[in-house]
Structures are given as structure tokens and as C-alpha cells.
């Protein structure tokens, strides 16, 4: 009987890196209290840090073993409480392969396995620093592919010079266009989280520092202050631009008879394999900036968290595709999507009802505007600019709300939230539930809300069309019941 194997010794470094990432603050706490401790407690603290940050990862590495069987993956782990996981290949949703640049010379990578039953953000199985032949062997068993001489003896100590190809039946391949990727990176929204982080850090500074900074700034010229703010935003924008290009470097989408494979990344090559049969829905996404540039991003919704690093935990399969070529490019990879742009003439918001979405948006911002304006007069009243923005957002949502029943088994729904247009293609078999709701006054106006629920990661994707025709919503409800 084949014995379970340990991961490569470099796996210990990955366990240690994760431990340092999760508990780095303990080192800062120790340095902060160092001068207040006696020699005995200093030694105790150093020993405790060594045990927790270095010895504990070593024990994790020593107790982690794996075995790739013809019918399942078996993983043993745990120091004080032992865990034995047996995952049949039929239950696997996605296999994700991550290869940092320092693992490439050793032909090693990290393999993550997820099933639909998972609940949190961590994969069921994570094997750090295993030979590339491990994932090749696993995929060969999953899809009944012939084992190659290289992929059969997948040991933790040796690896072949070149990994066997795990996609022998390639039907379609797509590589991103550099020009489209540059436009995609230029219009990224990564600067927004960075700006929020900077504002949060500013709020954590001591009041003496911020007061001194404000007093000094009053003596500076206004153009200098504006120039400094622009410089900070420019640096943040360039950082977000570079991050997107590095993240999606040499993005490649490949399709076989039964699966999709996405490969991307410069410093860490990330490869995700997902069965076509497990795709819950397709999402086409456009921010308002990318609408002006006629660029689309296509994602697939999966019943796993394999795409945690992507936007909204969905697996990006086409990061930047020109809108005119979207459907002709997408259809060969997912053949149940339409080969041309659909006409969304049903499930729209009637023109007399469009103001309702603007009203709802204004109701969301009006109270914060009044509070900010009253507490921080007079500059706080600048927040009143949010009111016309809310009105415009409501009109944007109304104009982009639409849907249509393309075939007896395929539904397309379009929404417009937060200046982003999203178009969903959902097969009837993948709809978890469909709900039509209306209030008393909406019933008088023949309006209704339509909600379609689809499996999304380890949770639920709720697609809601608001204030559409009640007759059209009821017609779709009867279609789903049939």
C-alpha cells in the first residue's frame, strides 16, 4: 500500500511565513514592552515567540501528509487533534495551483482543493510546496485522463524536469491583449481602498500631531497643498496600476471538453481549474469608466471560494475584452451563452417609475448629509453634493435594469449598482429560488421586485430587479414554476 507523503521541506517556510503574517503584532508588542521587563520575563517572551512562530509551524509541517489515490485525495493533519480528510474526486469543485517564483526552480507549487460543502474562506485542503506532478496526477484521476510516466510517481522529494501537461484535450485558448490590459489597469478602482486605508491611518494619529500638521499647513501656499494631494493620489494610482498588471500578467484562459483553466500572475503564477458543469452563472461587469472605453470583464460564479483573490470572489475568465468581441469570444468557452449581444427589451423599469430609484438613493444619503453638515459647519455642508450624485445613480440604475428570457432554459438579467453595470447569464437548472414581491402601492402601479438566487462561492448571489412591470415578473415566475 502506498504510504502518505510529506510536503517538500520548503513547505515549512510557507507555514512559517503564514504564522508571521498572522501574528506579526506579537513581535511589535514584545519590542514595545521590552524596556519594562526583567531579564527573566525577556527570556520567557523570546522563548514563547520562538515556539509559537518557528516551532509550531515545524510541527504543522511534520504532521501534514497527503496521498493521491485513484478514487480520492487523503490528507492527514493536526498536532493535538488529528484530522483525516477523504475527498472523492467527484466532490471536488476546483483545484487551484499557486507557484511563487522561488518555487519554480524546484518544480514545486501550492495546491488548494475546494468542494461545494465548504463554509469559510480557507480551502478544505492546502498542500504547500508539493511537486507539480501532484496536481497533474490529481487532474488525471478527476477527468479519467491517462497517467504519464512523469505524473505517476509524484513524490515530495523529487520532481521531473518538466511537468506533464494536465490539459491534453485543448479546444480553445485565449490570451489577453496587452493594450486592453493597460486600459483595464488604468481604470481600476484599487486606489479607493488605498485611500480609505490612508484616511483610517490619519484618524489613528495622535491629536497633537494632526493639530500641529494643520497649524503648519495654514502657512503653506494653497497650490502647494493641492499639489501634494495630487502627488499622493498619483502615487497611489500608479501603485494600483502596477498591481493589476502584475496580478493579471500573461493571463491565459484554456478550455477542454469538460473544464476551464485560468493561469495568471508574474511573481506568483496562479492556476485555477474548474469543471464546466459546476459553473453556476456568468457575470459580465462594467464600471462606468470601462463603459466609456467599451471594455468588459467576464466572471463565472462557482460554488467554491477558489477565486477569493478576484473581484467579489468570482473567477475572472476574461479580464479585459473589447465589448464588440465579447460574445463571439465567450461562446466557444461557455457554449450555453449567446453568440451575439442579446436584446434586453423585457424586465425593464417603466419610464414613469424611474424616479423611484432616485428617491431611494436620496433617502440613503439625506440623513448622513444632514448630520455631517450640522456637526462640521460650514464645510460639512459640502456633503450635500452627494444628493445630486444619488439622483444620478438612481437614474443610472433605472436605465441599466433589464432582462430577457433568451431560451426556455437561459435567463439574462442586468442591474446597475454603484455606477457598475452587471449582466448575469443564468440557466434555469442553476437557479436556487425565484421570488416576486410588491407592496400595496406598488400593486396599484403594476410594479414588482424580482429576485433570483444563485449559488455564489460558499454563500448566495442575489440578483434583484426593482420596479419592473408586474406582468413581466409574473410571467417569469410562471416560467420558473413550469
Image: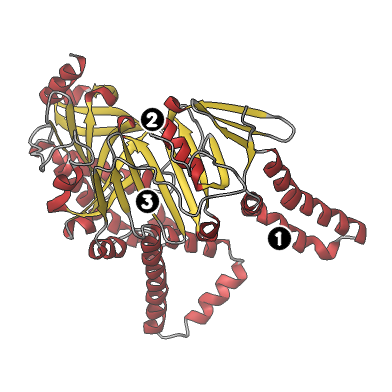
Q: Position of residue 334 (x, y in %)?
A: 23, 38
Q: Secondary structure at mark 2?
A: loop
Q: Vertical placement of 226 versus 310: above or below?
A: below
Marks 1 and 2, the one that precedes in the sequence: 1
Q: Vertical placement of 433 versus 459: above or below?
A: above
> Does residue 20 appear left or right of residue 326 in this picture?
right
Name the residue tied to disc 2.
Answer: 144
Q: Residue at x 22, y 57 (%)?
A: 290
- Badge 3 crowding class, 10 Å Cα cut-off, few under 14, some 14 to 19, many 20 or more, is many
**Quadrant in the picture for the N terminus:** top right
Q: Vertical placement of 413 versus 428: above or below?
A: below
- Badge 1 crowding class, 10 Å Cα cut-off, few under 14, some 14 to 19, many 20 or more, is few
Q: Position of residue 211 (x, y in %)?
A: 56, 72
> Does residue 193 appear left or right of residue 285 in this picture?
right
Location of residue 380 (image quadrant): bottom left
Q: Residue 263 — which label? A: 3
Q: Secondary structure at mark 3?
A: strand
- Badge 2 crowding class, 10 Å Cα cut-off, few under 14, some 14 to 19, many 20 or more, is few
Marks 3 and 2, the one that precedes in the sequence: 2
> Does residue 64 appear left or right of residue 418 in this picture?
right
Q: Are marks 1 and 2 in contact (CB under 8 Å)?
A: no
Q: CA distance from mark 3 to mark 1?
A: 37 Å
**Quadrant in the picture for the C terminus:** top left
Q: Is residue 458 visible?
A: no
Q: Secondary structure at mark 1?
A: helix
Q: Nearer the viewer, mark 1 or mark 2?
A: 2
Q: Nearer the viewer, mark 3 or mark 2?
A: 2
Marks 3 and 1, the one that precedes in the sequence: 1
Q: CA distance from mark 3 to mark 2?
A: 22 Å
Name the residue tied to disc 1.
Answer: 28
Q: Residue 425 — which label? A: none
- Viewer-closest of 63 and 388: 63
Amino acid at each position: 500500500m502506498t504510504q502518505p507523503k510529506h510536503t517538500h521541506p520548503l513547505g515549512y517556510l510557507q507555514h512559517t511565513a503564514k504564522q508571521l503574517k498572522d501574528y506579526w503584532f506579537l513581535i511589535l508588542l514584545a519590542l514595545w514592552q521590552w524596556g519594562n521587563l526583567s531579564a527573566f520575563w525577556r527570556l520567557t517572551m523570546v522563548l514563547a515567540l520562538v515556539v509559537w512562530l518557528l516551532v509550531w509551524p515545524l510541527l504543522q509541517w511534520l504532521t501534514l501528509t497527503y496521498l493521491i489515490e485513484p478514487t480520492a485525495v487523503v490528507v492527514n493533519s493536526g498536532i493535538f487533534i488529528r484530522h483525516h480528510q477523504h475527498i472523492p474526486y467527484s466532490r471536488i469543485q476546483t483545484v487551484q495551483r499557486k507557484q511563487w517564483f522561488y518555487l519554480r526552480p524546484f518544480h514545486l507549487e501550492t495546491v488548494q482543493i475546494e468542494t461545494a460543502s465548504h463554509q469559510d474562506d480557507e480551502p478544505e485542503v492546502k498542500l504547500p510546496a508539493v511537486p507539480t506532478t501532484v496536481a497533474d496526477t490529481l487532474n488525471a484521476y478527476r477527468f479519467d485522463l491517462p497517467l504519464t510516466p512523469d505524473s505517476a510517481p509524484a513524490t515530495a522529494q523529487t520532481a521531473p524536469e518538466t511537468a506533464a501537461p494536465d490539459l491534453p484535450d485543448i479546444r480553445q485558448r485565449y490570451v489577453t491583449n496587452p493594450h486592453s490590459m493597460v486600459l483595464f489597469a488604468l481604470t481600476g478602482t484599487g486606489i479607493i481602498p488605498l485611500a480609505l486605508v490612508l484616511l483610517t491611518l490619519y484618524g489613528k494619529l495622535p491629536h497633537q500631531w494632526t493639530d500641529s500638521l494643520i497649524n503648519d499647513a495654514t502657512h503653506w501656499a494653497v497650490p502647494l497643498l493641492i499639489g501634494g494631494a495630487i502627488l499622493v493620489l498619483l502615487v497611489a494610482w500608479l501603485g494600483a496600476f502596477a498591481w493589476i498588471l502584475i496580478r493579471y500578467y500573461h493571463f491565459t484562459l484554456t478550455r477542454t471538453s469538460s473544464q476551464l483553466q485560468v493561469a495568471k500572475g508574474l511573481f506568483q503564477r496562479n492556476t485555477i481549474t474548474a469543471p464546466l458543469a459546476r459553473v453556476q452563472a456568468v457575470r459580465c461587469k462594467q464600471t462606468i469608466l470601462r463603459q466609456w472605453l467599451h471594455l468588459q470583464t467576464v466572471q463565472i460564479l462557482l460554488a467554491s471560494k477558489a477565486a477569493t483573490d478576484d473581484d467579489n470572489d468570482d473567477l475572472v475568465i476574461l479580464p479585459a475584452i473589447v465589448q464588440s468581441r465579447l460574445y463571439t469570444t465567450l461562446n466557444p468557452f461557455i457554449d450555453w451563452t449567446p453568440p451575439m449581444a442579446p436584446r434586453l427589451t423585457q424586465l425593464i423599469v417603466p419610464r414613469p417609475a424611474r424616479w423611484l430609484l432616485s428617491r431611494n438613493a436620496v433617502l440613503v444619503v439625506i440623513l448622513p448629509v444632514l448630520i455631517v453638515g450640522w456637526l462640521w459647519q460650514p464645510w460639512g455642508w459640502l456633503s450635500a453634493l452627494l444628493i445630486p450624485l444619488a439622483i444620478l445613480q438612481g437614474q443610472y440604475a433605472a436605465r441599466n435594469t433589464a432582462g430577457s428570457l433568451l431560451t426556455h432554459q437561459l435567463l439574462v438579467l442586468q442591474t446597475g449598482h454603484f455606477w457598475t453595470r452587471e449582466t448575469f447569464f443564468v440557466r434555469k437548472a442553476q437557479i436556487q429560488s425565484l421570488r416576486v414581491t410588491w407592496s400595496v402601492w406598488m400593486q396599484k402601479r403594476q410594479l414588482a421586485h424580482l429576485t433570483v438566487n444563485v449559488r455564489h462561492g460558499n454563500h448566495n448571489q442575489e440578483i434583484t430587479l426593482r420596479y419592473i412591470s408586474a406582468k413581466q415578473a409574473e410571467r417569469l415566475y410562471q416560467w420558473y414554476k413550469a
